[in-house]
Amino acid sequence: MDDQRLMKTDSPDSNTMKSVMDRLKIFQPISDDDAAKETMKWEFRRRQGLIASLAQGLGSRYSFAAASLKTYRVYHANQKPVLAALRKLIEDENGIAETTGVILFGSYGTGKDHLAAAAMYEAIAKYGVVCKWVNGRNLFGASRDAMSLERAEETVIGPLVEPGIVCLSDVLPIGGELSAWNLDLLYRILDARYRA
């Protein structure tokens, strides 16, 4: 399959996906060796697929083109240190590997999801980290459905263990309080990730 066809079939936005290499300068020619070139192509396609998968989960609002730490517009002074910390974290591959968690909190519309999406896109593009986006309400609903259908809890928790980065968005219900059941599910997810 040639690159043009791959761009059209595997990408939510083929023009944006073409810019991955230019935007982040992740693949510079390292040699004229055919094996090295094939490895680079394979890795580019893998990362391209990871970006497309994340984009599908995030929806068009947080597309690869729209969510960027480099072009994020700060409109409140409290966003500056958060943006600086995320940029510093993403600049260093060891920072990503050694970080055990990041919590972004604030009121509705302050850019938490945008910043999280941008950080995950850049982690994929720069380092090939597998990332997963999960809406808290959907997570709790899937767990409830699994129980009512007598499916193993592993069907809900398992897909959240392997990715290098998992973003749990909007885990607080509209009422603002997590139930004991919600807290227990979140604990089991974190515990499973820690033990993996």
Image: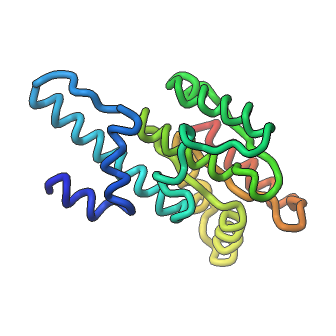
Taking the spot 69% from the left edge, 71% from the top edge, the residue there is 141
- Relative vertical location of residue 139 with respect to residue 54 in this rendering, above or below: below
- Relative vertical location of residue 75 with respect to residue 185 in this rendering, above or below: above
- Relative vertical location of residue 40 with respect to residue 151 in this rendering, above or below: above
Instruction: Tell me which corner region of the image, top left, top right, bottom left or bottom right, holds residue 99.
Output: top right
Question: In front here: 94 or 191?
Answer: 94
Question: In front here: 38 or 118?
Answer: 118
Question: In front here: 30 or 36?
Answer: 30
Residue 162 seen in render: no
Q: Position of residue 73 (x, y in %)?
A: 64, 44
Taking the spot 62% from the left edge, 46% from the top edge, the residue there is 116
Q: Is residue 19 left or right of residue 76?
A: left
Q: Position of residue 101 (x, y in %)?
A: 68, 36
Instruction: Tell me which corner region of the image, top left, top right, bottom left or bottom right, holds residue 196.
Output: top right
Taking the spot 19% from the left edge, 52% from the top edge, the residue there is 3
Residue 142 seen in render: yes
Q: Position of residue 20 (x, y in %)?
A: 36, 43
Instruction: Tell me which corner region of the image, top left, top right, bottom left or bottom right, holds residue 22.
Output: top left
Taking the spot 53% from the left edge, 22% from the top edge, the residue there is 94
